């Protein structure tokens, strides 16, 4: 029996390959052309180390010179001594180029639907001939049909043949104009994926998910994964947009409450109309400090750079040392 393993690297590349149940991880990686740096192959030098982000594994021999007991607690592992017992994800703190690893793949897809889901957002659905692997939170570069332009969008659902992307509709953007004016079901587009080092890690502590605008896309992919696989940790989604007309996917977000045991949702508008009855201002003004102070949590943050920077600053000001932050700043293309 094979398990599906993902290796992700510091440069944001992720590679997937099969590993036999009793096979040494390093052997499977080499067989698939991923030349992880190594030296002793005996669990002594520590050269082949990475960290397991999700899944079950065992190690044959680990010398204390290679990994300390704290390293082991943090799920650091030696590729030359590791055998996986389930599908698993490993992170290596160096660039994939060091392993001569092949890059992301280019695949062809066809547009299966475009749906305007708020005043400023569309969902683009793309059908592929073959399932594409990625980690929830990663993104793809999409070619804009009829142009030389490419734009990057986070996957808004789980890996497979049917993909979704939230697209911010700009007054005069290359992808926005295509979706509004020319897009037809069946249009062919090219996709380069998977990309990005922003992805859901093994869940061992409460999750705080923070989305600005179409940054929601990556977090919907993560929430779909949590709903599908089950999650025994509290999950709090914060979603910030300008006005009520910009909110989208309300029914889908509400439905997570019936699939994730402890799910909270807070939406905040930065420029609402006078009759908006809900929360207004910036997301950081509405973070639940009691949920974070003196506790451990993983925070996943996806949004435009000013928003990401303001949340980083807020965390530093509050001295919330237990919060592990993962973020994706998407540069909003204005064309
Ligand atoms: S190559 Fe030396 S510990 Fe794996």
Image: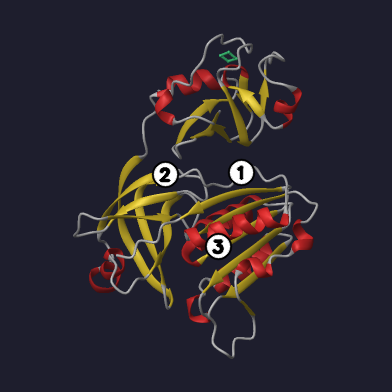
Q: Is residue 313 above or below residue 44?
A: below
Crowding near the residue tagged with mark 1, few <14, some 14–19, many ≥20 C-alpha atoms within 10 Å: many
Residue at the image position 38 percent from the left and 45 percent from the top: 193
Q: Quadrant of the C terminus?
A: bottom left
Q: CA distance from mark 3 to mark 1?
A: 17 Å
Q: Earlier in the sequence, mark 3 or mark 1?
A: 1
Which residue is identified by label 3? 211
Q: Quadrant of the N terminus?
A: top right
Residue 54, position as x, y percentages in the image: 62, 38
Residue at the image position 64 percent from the left and 86 percent from the top: 277
Which residue is identified by label 1? 201
Q: Is residue 326 above or below residue 51?
A: below
Residues at circles 1 and 2 in contact by the CB criterion of under 8 Å: no
Residue at the image position 59 percent from the left and 91 percent from the top: 275
Mark 2, mark 3: which one is toward the viewer? 3
Identify which residue, 255 or 307, lies in the foreground: 307
> Ligand 1 is found in which quarter of the picture?
top right
Give SS at disc 1: loop
Specify the label residue 194 is tagged with. Answer: 2
Q: Earlier in the sequence, mark 2 or mark 3?
A: 2
Residue 37, position as x, y percentages in the image: 49, 18
Left or right: residue 292 versus residue 242 is right
Residue 25, position as x, y percentages in the image: 55, 22
Residue at the image position 52 percent from the left and 49 percent from the top: 136
Give SS at disc 2: strand
Mark 3, mark 1: which one is toward the viewer? 3
Q: CA distance from mark 1 to mark 2?
A: 16 Å
Give SS at disc 3: strand
Left or right: residue 99 versus residue 290 is left
Identify which residue, 320 or 155, lies in the foreground: 320
Q: Is residue 13 above or below residue 59?
A: below
């Amino acid at each position: 029996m094979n398990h599906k393993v993902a290796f992700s690297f510091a440069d944001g590349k992720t590679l997937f390959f099969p590993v036999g149940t009793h096979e040494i991880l390093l052997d499977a990686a080499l067989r698939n052309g991923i030349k992880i740096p190594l030296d002793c192959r005996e669990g002594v030098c520590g050269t082949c180390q990475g960290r397991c982000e999700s899944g079950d594994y065992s190690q044959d021999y680990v010398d204390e010179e290679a990994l300390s007991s704290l390293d082991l607690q943090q799920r650091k592992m030696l590729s030359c001594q590791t055998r996986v017992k389930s599908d698993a994800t490993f992170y290596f703190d160096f660039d994939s180029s060091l392993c001569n690893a092949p890059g992301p793949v280019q695949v062809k897809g066809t547009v299966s639907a475009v749906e305007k889901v708020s005043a400023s957002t569309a969902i683009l659905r793309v059908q592929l001939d073959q399932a594409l692997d990625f980690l929830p939170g990663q993104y793809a570069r999409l070619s804009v049909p009829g142009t030389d332009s490419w734009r990057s969008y986070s996957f808004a659902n789980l890996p497979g043949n049917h993909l979704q992307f939230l697209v911010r509709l700009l007054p005069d953007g290359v992808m926005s104009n295509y979706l509004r004016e020319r897009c037809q079901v069946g249009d062919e587009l090219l996709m380069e994926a998977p990309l990005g080092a922003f992805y859901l890690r093994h869940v061992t502590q409460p999750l705080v998910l923070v989305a600005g605008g179409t940054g929601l896309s990556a977090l919907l992919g993560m929430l779909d994964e949590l709903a599908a696989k089950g999650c025994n940790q509290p999950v709090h989604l914060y979603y910030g947009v300008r006005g009520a007309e910009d909110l989208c996917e309300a029914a889908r977000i509400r439905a997570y409450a019936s699939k994730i045991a402890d799910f909270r949702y807070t939406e905040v508008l930065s420029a609402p109309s006078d009759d908006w009855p809900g929360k207004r201002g910036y997301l950081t003004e509405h973070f639940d400090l009691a949920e974070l102070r003196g506790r451990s949590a993983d925070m996943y943050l996806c949004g435009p750079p000013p928003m990401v920077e303001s949340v980083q600053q807020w965390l530093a000001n509050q001295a919330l040392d237990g919060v592990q932050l993962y973020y994706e700043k998407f540069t909003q293309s204005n064309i």
